C-alpha cells in the first residue's frame, strides 16, 4: 500500500469518527486545504514520467471524489443531529399558533399633515421646510419681533447657547423668511413642522406641530385670505358650510392681524364643527407686515400678501375627538391602534381625506 493510500485511509477514519461539525472542518482542511493531502499529491505529479503521471492523477481524482462524497454525507448527518439536539434543548412546541402580526398605523399628526398638504396643493400651495434649530434673526428679528417681546424670554423659548443667538424654533414662520430670501415673488407656500416652547399641560407640550401659510403677490387682500381659510376649514372638517368670524388681534409679523373662530355645537357630548351658537378659536392670521417683506428682500410697494398659523395637533384633536394633547407623544400602541390610520389610505380630495 502506497503512502498516499495510507494517508487517505487515515483521514477517512478520522472523518468517520468525527463527532462535531468543528471536527469535520478540521479533517476537511487536512484533505482539501491549501496544504492538504489532495493538493500535496497533485504537486508531486510534476516529477513523474508521463505514464506514471496519468496513472497517479487518476488515483488522486478518484480519492478526491470518494473523500468529497464522504465529507458531504458526514457534514449533513452531523448538522441534522446538531439541529435535532438544539430543538430538544429549546423544547419549542411547533404545534402552537404563530404570534399575532401587528400592522403599523399612521399617527394622527402625520395624517393631518398629509390632509392639510393635500387640501392646499389643490389651490396652488407648495410645501417648504426649514431647520428645527434656528437662529435668533430668522425666528424673531426678521419677523419684526421687538427686542423686549415676551416671546424672547428664556421661560418661553429653548435657547441652545448662552448668548441667546441659537434656539429651537418657536414657530415655523422662519421658513417664510428663508423661502422669500432664496427666491423671487410670487410665493404661495405652506410650512408644516415641529416647533418648541417651554410649556406643558393638557393642551400644551414642549414640542408640538405647527403649519404656517404664506401667499405673496401683487394686489393680495384680506378678501383672498378669508376665501382661502374658508375653503381650507370646510375641506378639512369635511362640511358643506362653516360659520367663521375674524377677531382683531396683534402679531408682530402681520398688520392687520386677526384670530379666526369657527362655529360649533355639542351633540351627544361631542363637538360638531360647522354651524352652531358656540365659537372656537382655530388659528391666527393677517396681512404680512411691510417690515417682514423688507427683511426678506421683497419690495412692499409692489407686493403684499397674507400669512396664517395653524396648530396641527389642535386640529387633530378637534377632528378626531382626542382630549389630551400629551397622549400624542406617549408612544402607547393601544392609543395609536385606536386613533391611527391605515398606511395605504393616503388622503386625497377625491377619495376623501379620512376614512
Image: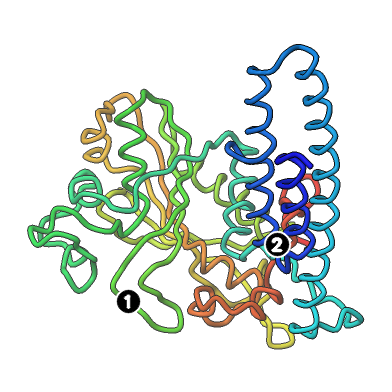
Dot 2: within a 10 Å radius of its alpha carbon, few (fewer than 14), some, or many (20 or more) residues? Answer: some
Residue corresponding to mark 2: 21
Left or right of residue 56: residue 94: right
Left or right of residue 300: residue 45: right
In the rendered structure, are the residues bearing label 1 and label 2 in contact, judged by CB atoms less than 8 Å apart?
no
Q: Position of residue 305 (x, y in %)?
A: 39, 37
| Residue depth check, mark 1 versus mark 2: number of the one nearer the observer | 2
Q: Position of residue 110 (x, y in %)?
A: 58, 58
Q: Of marks 1 and 2, which one's residue comes earlier in the chain? A: 2
Q: Is residue 74 above or below residue 98?
A: above
Residue most extreme to the left:
163
Q: Secondary structure at mark 2?
A: helix
Residue most extreme to the top:
50
Q: Is residue 30 above or below residue 112?
A: above
Q: How many marks?
A: 2
Residue corresponding to mark 1: 199
Where, quadrant-wise, is the N terminus in this rendering?
Answer: top right
* Distance between the alpha carbons at the discs numbered 1 and 2: 63 Å
* Image point (61%, 77%), residue name: 277
Q: Position of residue 147 (x, y in %)?
A: 10, 56
Q: Is residue 306 above or below residue 88?
A: above
Left or right of residue 64: residue 168: left
* Image point (78%, 53%), residue name: 12
Left or right of residue 288: residue 34: right
Amino acid at each position: 500500500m502506497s503512502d498516499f493510500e495510507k494517508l487517505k485511509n487515515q483521514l477517512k477514519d478520522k472523518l468517520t469518527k468525527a463527532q462535531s461539525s468543528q471536527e469535520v472542518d478540521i479533517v476537511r482542511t487536512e484533505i482539501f486545504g491549501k496544504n492538504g493531502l489532495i493538493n500535496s499529491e497533485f504537486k508531486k505529479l510534476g516529477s513523474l514520467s508521463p505514464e506514471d503521471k496519468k496513472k497517479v492523477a487518476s488515483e488522486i481524482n478518484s480519492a478526491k471524489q470518494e473523500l468529497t462524497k464522504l465529507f458531504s454525507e458526514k457534514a449533513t448527518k452531523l448538522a441534522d443531529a446538531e439541529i435535532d439536539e438544539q430543538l430538544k434543548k429549546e423544547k419549542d412546541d411547533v404545534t402552537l399558533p404563530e404570534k399575532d402580526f401587528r400592522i403599523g398605523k399612521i399617527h394622527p399628526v402625520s395624517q393631518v399633515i398629509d390632509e392639510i398638504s393635500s387640501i392646499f396643493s389643490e389651490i396652488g400651495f407648495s410645501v417648504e421646510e426649514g431647520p428645527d434649530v434656528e437662529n435668533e434673526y430668522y425666528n424673531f428679528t426678521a419677523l419684526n419681533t421687538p427686542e423686549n417681546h415676551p416671546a424672547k424670554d428664556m421661560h418661553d423659548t429653548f435657547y441652545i447657547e448662552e448668548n441667546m443667538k441659537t434656539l429651537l424654533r418657536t414657530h415655523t414662520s422662519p421658513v417664510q423668511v428663508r423661502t422669500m430670501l432664496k427666491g423671487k415673488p410670487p410665493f404661495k407656500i405652506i410650512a408644516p413642522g415641529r416647533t418648541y416652547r417651554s410649556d406643558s399641560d393638557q393642551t400644551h407640550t414642549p414640542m408640538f406641530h405647527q403649519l404656517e401659510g404664506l401667499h405673496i403677490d401683487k394686489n393680495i387682500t384680506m378678501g383672498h385670505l378669508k376665501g382661502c381659510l374658508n375653503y381650507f376649514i370646510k375641506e378639512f372638517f369635511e362640511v358643506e358650510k362653516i360659520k367663521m368670524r375674524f377677531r382683531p388681534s396683534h402679531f408682530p409679523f402681520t398688520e392687520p392681524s386677526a384670530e379666526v373662530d369657527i362655529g360649533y355645537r355639542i351633540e351627544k357630548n361631542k363637538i360638531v364643527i360647522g354651524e352652531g351658537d358656540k365659537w372656537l378659536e382655530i388659528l391666527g392670521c393677517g396681512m404680512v407686515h411691510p417690515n417682514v417683506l423688507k427683511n426678506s428682500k421683497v419690495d412692499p410697494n409692489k407686493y403684499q400678501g397674507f400669512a396664517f398659523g395653524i396648530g396641527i395637533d389642535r386640529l387633530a384633536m378637534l377632528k378626531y375627538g382626542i382630549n389630551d394633547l400629551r397622549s400624542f407623544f406617549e408612544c402607547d400602541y393601544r392609543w395609536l391602534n385606536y386613533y391611527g390610520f391605515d398606511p395605504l389610505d393616503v388622503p386625497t380630495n377625491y377619495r376623501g381625506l379620512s376614512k
